[in-house]
Image (spheres, coloured by chain):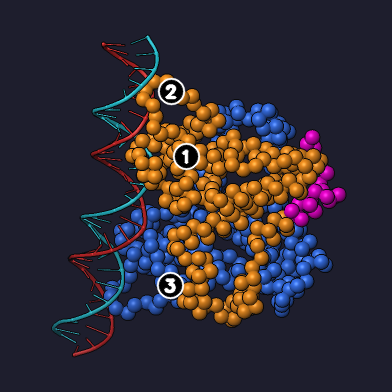
Chain colours: A orange, B blue, C red, D cyan
Amino acid sequence: MKSDRDRSVRLLWEPPAEPTRGPKAALSQSRVVEAAIKVADAEGVEALTMRRVAETLGFTTMSLYRHVPGKSELLDLMVDAVWAGTEHTPKGAWRAGLEFFARQVWAMYRAHPWMLQLTSSRRMPGPEAMTRQDAAYAVVSELGLASEEIVAVVTAVSHFVHGVGRTMADRVQAERETGVSEEDWWNGREALWEHFTPDRLPMMTHIWNSGGFERMLDDFEFGLARVLDGLAAFIESEDRPLVRPETCL
Amino acid sequence: MKSDRDRSVRLLWEPPAEPTRGPKAALSQSRVVEAAIKVADAEGVEALTMRRVAETLGFTTMSLYRHVPGKSELLDLMVDAVWAGTEHTPKGAWRAGLEFFARQVWAMYRAHPWMLQLTSSRRMPGPEAMTRQDAAYAVVSELGLASEEIVAVVTAVSHFVHGVGRTMADRVQAERETGVSEEDWWNGREALWEHFTPDRLPMMTHIWNSGGFERMLDDFEFGLARVLDGLAAFIESEDRPLVRPETCL
DNA sequence: TAGAACCGTGTACAACGTACACCTGGTGTA
DNA sequence: TACACCAGGTGTACGTTGTACACGGTTCTA
């Protein structure tokens, strides 16, 4: 599971030419990556083993290593392949743009919840991911913000989507593993609810009794609107610290 | 690694009495949990193996299973033990209260980054975590919001802190694993930077050149202020959908 | 046509959680 | 006091993981 990260860079940013010698390859890197994505989609990242990927392709485990240096690099490639399936944020109004970006990322996480489990701060970013990131920066670049503020604004949105996404991904994973829906599972935890008494947890029992856990608002929609409102207040405020070394664009 | 969740409930909410028969136990559940937390703090959750915990305690691996049913339950106990070390949100103004809550959770995540890797939607909540959650709900309960809105407001803050936290936790983990700081590591990725050209990534190179990635704002402080601003706009708005079946308190 | 380059296979190893059988030491009951 | 029983701690063993390594077959180049 060790990984030479510069090898990942070459893998992602400088796809190698096809070899001229040797037998025709029955397998290819893209087929391996696609198969791995399918496995992760259907069975979760914890079921994503080299053996399992090879099995779905009808090859032996070790044959994968002819096309992918190791599992870590395979994960890098999967992540960038999924990013490739998202749309770039179009130029335009900052708020519409950030909302577009957030919804693209959200849709991506919903389609491939395992993406959220593959975010390490050292995972090598690929070109597809980076161009999307660049477009997101671009949409807030004409507001007279300092460049570190541009970064902070986009990052705030990302952190929020990331947070909601993880909760969603955890639920999806748990539902697949147990075969029981979130609601059914928690409803079955009578041994737990016995301890939810008004003296110990007054607010939770009150919210429960008034149905607040049944009529839940959409976490993503509610939160996104609040985050964008908060950013609007920041962007439109006049007393924003004006000590900005340079404005961007 | 399988787990009987009702057993976890009993473990967390109904700590068993000490047995009267048999030899005096040299080990205890709390010692196992404490040792496990120390291992996770120092070496990360990926180094948290039953063998490693036993080793630090000077016992054999299997001795742990006399005090803890399995690894999954040990994780449940670790999580609740860490929550026990945080302060309850005091009653008072909603904004100060939510900020207090966010900072408590943030401090907890900073001290124990592995907590963020143990959040599954089916992980059994313990009494310590739940009373903190209850106090957070309480602080927004006197604003005339519907109970599902109370949940949504607290959840929005949680998602944000969770998102920032994961990024931080990933960085801490990577720094421990590689022994190289985030900054040094990325600075060493020259093979990657070669591909960051203005034609491919115009905004990123511009932000880079104007120092926007060096003078980064504090993600937590910046984002928290925006989220609270956004929630304030929601709470104080007059045209908030008034079709609220019941208000809370 | 010889040889190099490349593809796919099979075997093997260390680390993981933990089931199971075992011995040992202490307590409650007869 | 005798003894049955129960709980604590140990040692062994199994299945699963990623992947190193050696091998044999295939196809293009010199």
Residue located beneath label 2 in the image: A19
Give the residues in magenta. A228-249
Residue located beneath label 3 in the image: B6
For image coordinates 74% across by 64% down, the residue present is B95
Q: Quadrant of the N terminus of chain B?
A: bottom left
Queried whether the magenta region covers residue A190, the answer comes back as: no
Between A98 and A144, the one lying in front of the other is A98
Q: Are marks 3 and 1 on the same chain?
A: no
Q: What is the CA distance from the residue labelled 3 to the residue labelled 1? A: 39 Å
Between B201 and D1, the one lying in front of the other is B201
Residue located beneath label 1 in the image: A33
Q: Is residue B70 visible?
A: yes
Q: Quadrant of the C terminus of chain B?
A: bottom right
Q: Quadrant of residue A168?
A: bottom right
Q: Is residue B139 visible?
A: no
Query: In this picture, is B225 found above or below B189?
Result: below
